[in-house]
Image (tube, coloured by chain):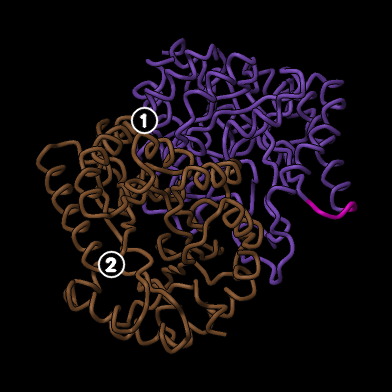
Chain colours: A purple, B brown
Amino acid sequence: MSNELARLSLNTATTKRWTLQEAVDGAVRAGLGSIGLWRDRVHEAGVTESAKIVADAGLRVSSLCRGGFLTAEDDRAAKVALDDNRRAIVEAATLGTRELVMVVGGLPASTEPGRPAQPGTGGRDIVAARQRVADRIGELAPFAAGHGVRLVLEALHPIFAADRAVISTLGQALDIAEPFPADVVGVVVDTYHVWWDPDLQRQIARAGAAGRIAGYQVCDWILPLASDALLSRGHVGDGFIDFPTITRWVAEAGYTGDVEVEIFNESIWDAPGDETVATLAARYLEHVQPFL
Amino acid sequence: MSNELARLSLNTATTKRWTLQEAVDGAVRAGLGSIGLWRDRVHEAGVTESAKIVADAGLRVSSLCRGGFLTAEDDRAAKVALDDNRRAIVEAATLGTRELVMVVGGLPASTEPGRPAQPGTGGRDIVAARQRVADRIGELAPFAAGHGVRLVLEALHPIFAADRAVISTLGQALDIAEPFPADVVGVVVDTYHVWWDPDLQRQIARAGAAGRIAGYQVCDWILPLASDALLSRGHVGDGFIDFPTITRWVAEAGYTGDVEVEIFNESIWDAPGDETVATLAARYLEHVQPFL
């Protein structure tokens, strides 16, 4: 059993009520090989202490979530964002992971994620917002490289294009990554965000050929949508996504890393953590692992 | 005033409480040049009578909504869908519009739009579902051509990929259209569905160069999402979409047709129809018309 789960990683956002120590213990109990960390849990425990907890448990850190939010129009807000990203890079290095997941940010017209647009005609230029992301990845890249950390661009589902990420496709993420070495800027394939993309197979192959697949995250697209769309994710197998096919594409692209389960969902958060981990392990063995 | 609104079209879905006659009268009162018809309102009034109402009012019919739902796996359901599409083609011809908008349908795992997926592992192959769409467009094309009607493929926002349309991008719609003459299979550019697409400018130009832009629909992406995501559309200017830029791209692509406003939104439906039409005309004059 533990061998079959060696590549499975529990993202701490999936068991939201658990502390970092509890999530590490839960992952070990279930025989998982890896854990994906969110910065809130890491800050709670302390960065150095978190690194020790994970290392003592013998787990890998598949990724640190998240850096990003790089689309601000004004220089002061941009500087604040860049400084925070540099701190995240240092944290990733301290935690012993190479992969820092970047949610790049939405339009300047976004007041806060999920909320109405600012009135007026400004802050809606998505082409310019994307260019600022590319420029600021360029500013961060040398610092990341110096710390042995990769900036991992995450394409978010277009449902989040206004308020969370102006990168909506894997192809677009790869276009932004292309000027940089593959070990400095990569991409993550998150089934929830990219399953609908008609160009997905080709872009996964392209990402693999370039050595840029930094992570593979799985959770399902379920309907009806939750009232907060961010929380509208389901366990693998509960929704509409064709996991065998996408997993094969990722495997054929040469990806041999961890498979992270990151689910935002109130009812899953309300379930006991061990039950959630047991479910995600069972679903992984049914829908994902045989196709890796 | 009426000249500036000559290309503005009221889609009957925007003033949902109005009958076809009321919508026609409302459009004429406001000085609009055109109307987009949904089949429910047309069937209510009768197809021939609807054609007469619109013609007597001196309006163009910018499009008929909608055909489609072509993704069924079993032959019997496919035949029912094809028969219904043939009826829609005849209706479009009778109404005097060339443009029949096609919402191509979601995954077979979809039980009904907005509802959970069927349990089990079947019905999730989106690649195969897209191929069935392409094949069935091929079956319908000669019948449409024979009636002087164009099958207008509508890329829907990926939020609807599971349950309403496995065509999610304009580029994908154009790929499916490519084997057919431009006056038999076209595409519609609906800002709500495509605004986030990083390849949008290029694909609009491609559609224009091929003579395939059959319609331009405008409404805004607003947040928070409505509890029924389908109804989460706003008046132009109330959300996040950069209408001047996209409108310029459409104009530069050579589009000279009508601009249809199609908004699904409970609170807009609850407003008096004349107020809704006045608002959409004002927003059109501010955000769209100057850039055409």
Q: Which residue is mark 2?
A: B96
Foreground mark, 2 or 1, reads 2
Q: Residue at x 40, y 78 (%)?
A: B269
> Which residue sits at x=41%, y=29%?
A278
* Image label count: 2
Q: Viewed as shown, does residue A250 lie left or right of B186?
A: right
Cα distance between the residues tagged 2 and 1: 42 Å
Q: Residues within 10 Å of mark 1 (few under 14, many from 20)?
A: many
In the image, which disc is placed on residue A242? Answer: 1
In-image side of B66 versus A105 (left or right): left
- Left of A142 or right of it: where is B170? left
Q: Are marks 2 and 1 on the same chain?
A: no
Q: Amino acid at mark 1?
A: Asp
Q: Residue at x 30, y 47 (%)?
A: B105
The magenta region covers A72-76
Q: Is residue B163 left or right of residue B279?
A: left
Q: Tell me what residue is drawn at x 30 percent, y 36 percent.
A: B134
Percent across and percent down for residue A222 are 39, 45
Question: Image height check: is A150 above or below B38?
Answer: above
For this rendering, which residue is in front, B152 or B158?
B152
Q: A239 and B38: which one is in front?
A: B38
The one of B25 and A49 positioned closer to us in this rendering: B25
Q: Amino acid at mark 2?
A: Gly
In the rendered image, the quadrant that contains the N terminus of chain B is bottom right
